[in-house]
Image (cartoon, grey):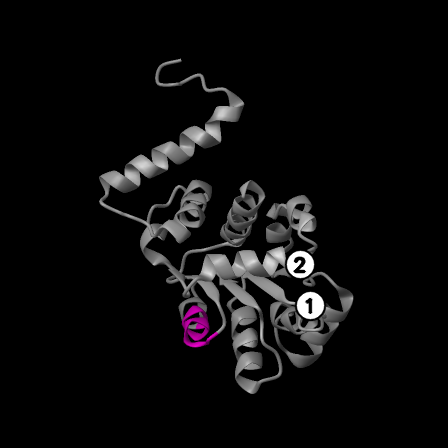
Amino acid sequence: MNGIEHVQPEEIEKRSFAIISKELEERGVTLPKEQALITKRVIHTTADFTYAQTLRYSENAVETAKRLIGDGADIVTDTNMALAGINKRLLARFGGAAHCFMAEEAVMRMAKERGTTRAAVSMEMAARIKKPVVFAVGNAPTALIRLYEMIESGTYRPAFIIGVPVGFVNVEAAKELILKTDVPYIVNCGRKGGSNVAAAICNAILYQMGNE
């Protein structure tokens, strides 16, 4: 077929990353070495090069996330879609597990009683985990807002926040709240993001660790 290349399955991802690197170079974009593989995997997941400009990393963010996961930190997501996308087998190699509390009956009941979102309540449930937690938020800005409230009140401090919810209502403002904290983070500014992006960032970190 015209324009269709025959590429071996094991070569597709390698070829894709080579194309991404070439196009970034053509656009005059040089990514910081620590961040490059994370940003490139997000671009690979979305085919959207604007992430090269909008992803924000706190100081030494990737090394901090790798240290936390290497020490057995768990990952908590705000959607079962993100949970499904994370490489849990690789995470388990480092002593961690991945969780999503959104579908739990207690979360649904508490959210209804309090007139809030399940995402906000699920962050409170995650705060009960007796070990460091990396939060991967790809859908609900209310999850980021609740994390910020707990940080500000001193009731809970996340170990790390991946803040990439997608949408139009409170999304940008919620991300800006996380940027104001001293909690290590990877945040995508603006409206874009999603569960696939949250999972991609987690996996990019895990794959780096698996290759080291």
Residue 66 placed where, x, y %? 54, 56
Secondary structure mainly formed by the magenta segment: helix
Residue of label 2: 72
Per the rendered image, the range of residues in magenta is 174-182
Q: Are marks 1 and 2 in contact (CB under 8 Å)?
A: yes
Please tell me whether mark 1 sits on a helix, a strand or a loop.
Answer: loop
Give whichever of 146, 58 is nearer the camera. Answer: 58
Residue 143 picture quarter: bottom right
Residue 154 shows in the view: yes
* Mark 1 burial class by Cα count in 10 Å: few <14, some 14-19, many 20+: some
Residue 172 placed where, x, y %? 40, 68
Residue at 42% in and 64% down: 168
Callout 1, which amino acid? Lys
Label annotation for residue 131: 1
Q: Residue furthest front?
A: 212
Residue 166 shows in the view: no
Residue 86 placed where, x, y %? 61, 48
